[in-house]
Amino acid sequence: MKVLHVIPSISPLRGGPSVAALEMTAALRQVGVEASILTTNDHGSGSRSDLPIGRWTDVDSVPVLMLGRWAAPVVALRDFAFTPGLARWLRTHGNEFDLLHVHALFSYPSTAAMAFARGAGLPYVVSTIGQLCVWSLQQGPRRKHLYLRLLERTNLEGAAALHFTTTAEQEEARQLGLTAPGLVLPLGVKAPLGLPMPEAAPPVRFLFLSRLHPKKRLEVLLDALALVQARAPGASWQLAIAGDGEADYMAALRRRADDLGVGDRCRWLGFLEGQVKWEALAKAHWFVLPSASENFGIAAIEALAAGTPPILSPEVAIAEQIQAAGAGWVVPGQAEPLAERLIAALAGPPAGMVAAARQLAAEAFSWEVIAAKLKAAYGESLQARRRPLL
């Protein structure tokens, strides 16, 4: 089975879905799927990848073909990732594949790939990466709903399956009245061996690891920690902040921390990846994410795999599953209730919670298991191969 994954970017600076697409493709290759990636040279924040353009390159044991993205002077157009040669490449080479797996919406590479597959009668699966969730559609709603009406709805309806990472994500997408078959399958994670343990002695280490964006509500966490400092003035704790974002927004966050009087307890680590990221996760006592909306929450799953229990808002779609497994806590994403939970967290994770976190990651979020299920879904899509939609 030969499957082409199409995604606007595989840069880790674009967040979890870009990283997951590369890991998913590698896992599929391990279970016998001849999977590869077609993408652009986007590297986040207007920069470009230094990987070669126009020829297949091995990236983490995955064949990747990058095409040049047009560097539009307007941010909104730049994020659209217009890639002049992509449609032409698909017309020439697209039928060499049995199936396309498209990641993301509202972006030229994704839209062009779906349109090509529809016209060619080629089955395709679409990973919606949370972009059909209510919160996401409320960001630039006029543009997105117009795009849906003119282009993307037809593409989505033509899919052999719409891939959702949680049932909560699927339920939100159903509000749009889409009729294409749904496939609920989580993303996977694999922690490296030999990760360090957090130090038993104070301070208690909280970790926020995510893209720095208002959606993630780091402001709420800073406000909550200011309450912790006022109510438990003798407690010893630190907050490590790992992530990157727009320069003005990051500067505003630092000012907020200083104004709240917790700036000296914050360690700004910047963007982390690879072994350094995993070590930061493993050294923390708690991972905290009070996000306003997460269709999945890959960083929370990585925390589980590192043995670091998460403290999550209910809007993180996997929060309920984590709490049910005794692997973390769920608390409303407001300063007052979060502060109360953080004060309780100063005692460290309860007995058994660290083991429960690792067990949940191993049993529910193994790439090997997920890849095997996805391969089976591909097989079903090929059996139900659709005729061209003209």
Image (cartoon, rainbow, N blue to C red):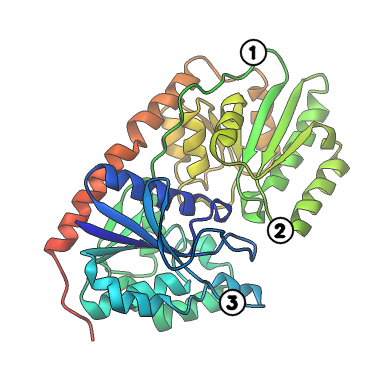
Q: Are marks 1 and 3 in contact (CB under 8 Å)?
A: no
Q: For the residue carrying disc 1, how many other residues have a C-alpha within 10 Å: few (<14), some (14-19), or many (20+)?
A: few
User: Marks 2 and 1, how far apart in space?
Assistant: 35 Å
- Disc 1 is placed on an element classified as loop
- Examine the image and state in which quarter residue 154 appears: bottom left
Q: Amino acid at mark 2?
A: Glu
Looking at the image, which residue is at 15% across and 68% down?
Answer: 385
Q: Is residue 57 left or right of residue 74?
A: left
Name the residue nearer the viewer: 358 or 294: 358
Q: Identify the element where label 3 is drawn.
A: helix
Vertical comparison of 377 with 134: above or below: above
Q: Indicate the position of residue 355 as horizontal and vertical percent values.
A: 45, 19
Tell me, for residue 77, which label it has, or none.
Answer: 3
For mark 1, what is the residue? 200
Q: Which residue is mark 2?
A: 246
Of the two numbered discs 1 and 3 in the rendering, the one whose residue sits closer to the viewer: 3
| Picture quarter with the N terminus | bottom left
Q: Secondary structure at mark 2?
A: loop
State the quadrant of the C terminus.
bottom left
Amino acid at circle 1: Ala
Residue furthest left as drawn: 383
Q: CA distance from mark 1 to mark 3?
A: 49 Å
In the image, residue 81 above or below residue 307 = below
* 3 or 2: tag closer to the N-terminus: 3
Rendering quarter of residue 190: top left
